[in-house]
Image: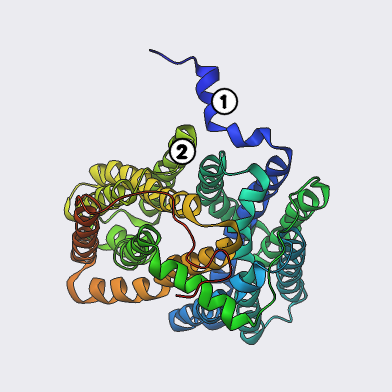
Amino acid sequence: MIRRPRAALGDIFASLRHRNFRLFWTGQLVSVTGNWMNQVAQGWLVLELTDSPVMLGTVGALRWLPVLLLTTFMGAFADRYPKQAILKWTQGLLMALALALGLLTLAGWVRIWHVMLISLLTGVVNSLDNPTRQSFYVELVGKDDLPNAIALNSSVFNGARVIGPAVAGFVIELFGTGPAFILNGVSYLAVLAGLALMRDLPPAAPRPRRRLLEDVGEGLRYIRTTRDVFWAIALLGVVGVFAINWNVVLPVLAKGALEVGAQGLGFLYTALGVGALAGGLALAAARRAPGGVAEVAGYAALFSVLTGAAGAVPSYLLDLVLLALAGYAMIRFTAGCNSFVQSLVPDELRSRVMAVYFLVFGGSTPFGAELLGALAEWFGARWAMVLGSLVALAFSGFVLWLARRPSWVVGPAESPVADGSRGA
């Protein structure tokens, strides 16, 4: 049966019928575009100030260091207080940091230590903002529309990945890096306005007050003792380290093996972004979380195969096609993994579990970037992509094999400590 286009479109944007989510999603659309502009402008500014690739990596590491150290504790903190109030504070602080860097740059006072300090403070705020934001969606749309909301959020991120860098390049070329930082700061107003206009959010469930470390331990025990959640997060970490690090390898591939230059590199990123956007919209149209770890592992395996193939083929045009397909599979894997985990986790543990989720996913970026960068230097960009994808494929296949064994029964997860009376 052929579905009418209007019905299909309604499936894709189903969660936008919720007013609160519509406000938040629209604000994210503006703000994430500003974030991508900021990322491009910050890299350009660091190179202008220092002309040092090492310092570029140092500034990036300073942004991720607080995330690695603090996120699990911040997730426990986020489970204690209303998420709307937390996000007002975090988004306001991120806006202030972006505007500070913009004003310092416009005034000609900016020094590299300013950039380093602001990057570090941004990481501290993000360590609270990210798990809070990830666990906020269920309050905006409910559990039935949660997979659709997560997929639409992923579509926003990947749509901004296509638009933001292009706008940043235009702004930097005409006006310099300062205005790009200012525009990023102003973009947070869209999220803050949406948060202020939200109404009728569900009240926070009362929870026993304990020490923060006890709350952290409760979340970690839940992950360790809930097989589906544990293997989904483990799969995300391994594939994240070995396969999802395009920023390191693609420039080397474009300049060396493919010999296509900066414009050709831009098309490679665009192909990846277009595929990722299509994957997010397809997942949104499905309006369901993956049915089990096997489905998540299947898309991880497909993504790994496409990544390896993109590294192996000698044709630029074929690489464009393979990267578009890889972008599609990547989002079906990552956003699908997110919605699968959130479909299982109890509400009282959601921020803590999503803090670990974000820690594994985000933390894989610096480690994976260093690893693939080293492999590219030793063996070339093609072999780096092939070797990384083979490791990711092997682990995906292992998880797929585990999940299809007769002893693996997929069902709703129950927190082993949900009633507050049981330990590990």
Q: Amino acid at mark 1?
A: Gly
The quadrant of the image that shows the C terminus is bottom left
Q: Is residue 64 above or below residue 166?
A: below
Q: Amino acid at mark 2?
A: Arg
Horizontal and vertical percent position of residue 207: 68, 67
Q: Name the quadrant containing residue 223.
A: bottom left
Q: Residue at x 82, y 47 (%)?
A: 197
Horizontal and vertical percent position of residue 3: 45, 16
Tell me if I can see residue 46 in this picture: no
Q: How many marks?
A: 2
Sequence order check: which comes first, mark 1 or mark 2?
1
Residue 246 relative to residue 27: left or right: left
**Element under label 1?**
helix
Q: Is residue 124 above or below residue 318?
A: below
Mark 2 sits on what residue? 288
Nearer mark to the viewer, of 1 and 2:
2
Residue 20 relative to residue 261: left or right: right
Q: Residue furthest bottom?
A: 113
Mark 1 sits on what residue? 10
Tell me if I can see residue 95 in this picture: yes
**Element under label 2?**
loop
Residue 319: assigned label:
none
Name the colouring of the figure.
Answer: rainbow
Q: Name the quadrant containing residue 10.
A: top right
The quadrant of the image that shows the N terminus is top left
Q: Residue at x 69, y 60 (%)?
A: 184
Q: Residue at x 57, y 58 (%)?
A: 36
Q: Is residue 29 above or below residue 178?
A: above
